[in-house]
Image: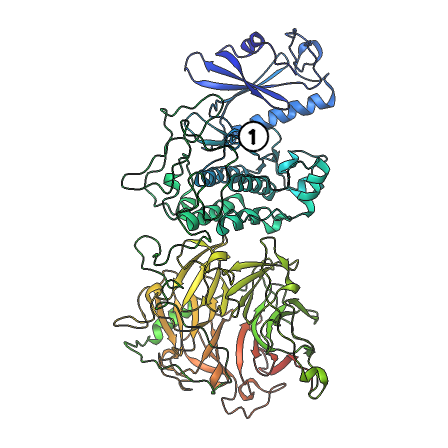
Amino acid sequence: MPTPMPDLIATALPGYEIGAELGRGGFGAVLAARHRLMGRAVAVKVLLDPEASGTGSGSGGGPGGGVLSGPGGGVFGSGGDESSDLRSRFLSEARVLAGLDHTHIVRVYDYVEHAGLCLLVMEQLTGGSLRARMAAGGLDPRAGCAVGLAAATALAAAHQIGVLHRDVKPDNLLFDASGVPKVTDFGIAKIVETTAVTTTGLVGTPRYMAPEQIEGSRLGPGTDIYALGIVLYELLAGRPMFPRGLAVPALLHHHLSVPPQPLPEVPAPLAAVVLAALAKHPTERPASAHELALHLAAATTAVFGPGWLATAGVPVRLPDDVLTAAGHRLGDTLPAPSGAWTTPAHYLAQPTVITPPGSTPLGTPPPTPTTPAPPGQQFSVGQPGPGGWQPYPANGTPPPGLGGPAGFPPQPGPASPALAPTRRRRRARPGARRRTAFIAAGVGVVCVAALVVGLVLATGGGHGGAKAGYAGEQRVLTAGGYLGGIGLAEDGSIFVAASDASEGTAAVYQLSPDGILRKIAGIGPPAAQPSGTPSAETSTPPPSPAPIPASGISALSLVLQDPRAVVVAPGGARYIADYGANRVYRITPAGQAFVFAGASADEDGFTVDSGLATKAALYGPTALAIGPDGSVYIAEGNRIRKVTKDGLISTVAGAASRSSAGNREGDGGPATKATLPSPNGLAVADDGTIYVSDDNLETVRKITPAGIISTVAGTAGTSGDTGDGGPAAKALLYDPIDVALGGDGSLYIADQSNGKIRRIGVDGVITTYAGVGSSGSGGLDGTLATQADMGSVDAIIVDPSGAVYATLYYESTLVRIDPDDHIVRALVVPPAT
């Protein structure tokens, strides 16, 4: 495909001086040019006809023209369907680029059709391609991550206006003369429409194709995320994702069915981000390119520490939230484009590192034109590459003693055992546990008026469009297990956690609106057997949890140690807090399980609030709640953590130390400075107000959206069963273990050792809603709620109809309290013995 003669192009672009050819792709050549009046250097992309021979056609055609032309030399038409399609793609690229104004996307200045020529005048990028840099020795890992952030935010901008790139690869990531990375070649970009978007053939580069591209399935942002994931894989590992030398059919098979090769040479936080982007199914990848950028920024910060971006040597312009996740303080200097930076024509090595005043570069500077990296350099965990992994330990855990973000105190964790929260006890039979000594100091009393305001603002309970829960015939759970955490889905399904006496054989069950009871997660305990049978007298060792890859596992293969809480998000994702594993799992509606939060048993995990939740240290998570923005709240250890939809974790309540001077509880002040000895129940209102029960403090407290904490029920450090008919803040509770919000703004409390469910109305008055008390002398199924023996009431939830569901832990029973007649019905019971 020869390039059209320069004089023909010059005729089409009289305002430009046409220079030499810079390069070419499958259907286009790129020539250098300069605007005659402004002096601006540009690149002119010329569409080439793959069918053209050495002779042009139509008017203006000449030897070596290779121009697509129509009858009489007009614009396209006689070149057949392929020529017409090429012209459409070329015009599409021009339109796409014209609609994108982003620092990290190549800019388009003009589009011209003339005498059969299609010309695209663009920003000139003389800094070479990412492919060339990789071939010449690779990038410093920080520089590679910075390039990844630039590409991810560029793709996010394209996706935001409905454009998919469909051919993300190192060849299409170029650098300008100042070293700024740019996404280029939107020649096969696809404008996403509201109807299904499918491909009728392979469009893209096989090495970087997503499974859905190969299958001809619906495409979306995940398609570009997968391709960028491969680019990141190659950047950080210094090798291809799949074995070299695969034929195209074998390569496509690998994309469809074979997991990527592991990344032992890459620190765990970064490896997790890359492998998540490479999930086979689009729904299991980051939800957006922006989310990928946040994950990548946080992971790189976990590996290299705050300030890594300023020493990466790659000029970038990123959204504020990405900069924050990257550990960069807004307002600090980042590397800026420098006209003084020049590189050899054959290869642009790293630009000179620009370090903000007073800062020190991390590790060895990246290669420069005078000190190129050795060819084929790869990075090994704990060993320096070009710039190296060495600033932080190989497992991605910040060094011991590190504090939180700038200006914040150190966070609890293994590095500071004095601050580490105590392990939560296993549930004890009500009234039988040994209480922890606790002296209340500075106990405040919240007036009724303040309580009324607090509850009135918290209406809704987060039900949204959810349906009422199951209210049909009784079901028998044939497998043994104590029933604990409970969740409600939008369709009315009830999810309940069942823990067995042997850790590792727990499960979560779904009771669907049509009354079907089935296991949806965990291997589960063996079926219950009558006492005296051989199987009942023997036991087998519990299974050991297996590592969970980034691609997930079947939820039915998940080894659950001690699930304490279940919550269901809008859209159907289920979250399970496993107290025994120090983790929270996410289960997709399709039944795939992923680690949502909590480091693995062989990782220390980080404790600061700037990183991925999957790498954070959790200590016995006991409660979960979904916020109005989709964030997941986790009660664990002595804190309440928040995990955003981007997978980043932070602390919203709980002081780093369990002791503090003056007001030990922290009421009236920031929740992050308050003491939470044993948070074990959570509820989040539609306005973002958080309610938390604490069975050590014997209180229920609320945290306003502004982060201020106060007590709404109970007296800190004093247990009892008093106060009905009066202000909730003056009542006494005994092991409040869970809370739930009603649709009318009322607050329900599982008052476990009192054997009751208490209710606080919007007037701030507390009453007993269900339970005869700790004497346990009442009945259950078919009994009026206030006369029922609620035994070891453990978890509660309220459906949109006002029905209250509760699990009785040691009775292995799920009950429903009818909102109209107030009668208790046992919905799930153990087998008769």
Compared with 113, 658 (above or below) is below
Query: Which residue is nearer to you in this view: 245 or 515?
Result: 245
Residue 441: image location, x then y, percent: 28, 77
Q: Is residue 390 left or right of residue 559?
A: left
Residue 248: image location, x then y, percent: 70, 35
Whether residue 156 is visible to the viewer of this picture, yes or no, is yes
Quadrant placement of the C terminus: bottom right
Residue 598: image location, x then y, percent: 49, 61
Compared with 599, 62 (above or below) is above
Q: Is residue 218 left or right of residue 668?
A: right
**Residue 482, quarter of the rendered image:** bottom right
* Amino acid type of the residue tagged 1 in the rendering: Asp
Identify the residue at image location x=45%, y=51%: 394
Q: Is residue 144 left or right of residue 591?
A: left
Residue 748: image location, x then y, percent: 48, 75
Residue assigned mark 1 = 171
Identify the residue at image location x=48%, y=56%: 615
Identify the residue at image location x=67%, y=69%: 519
**Residue 515, quarter of the rendered image:** bottom right
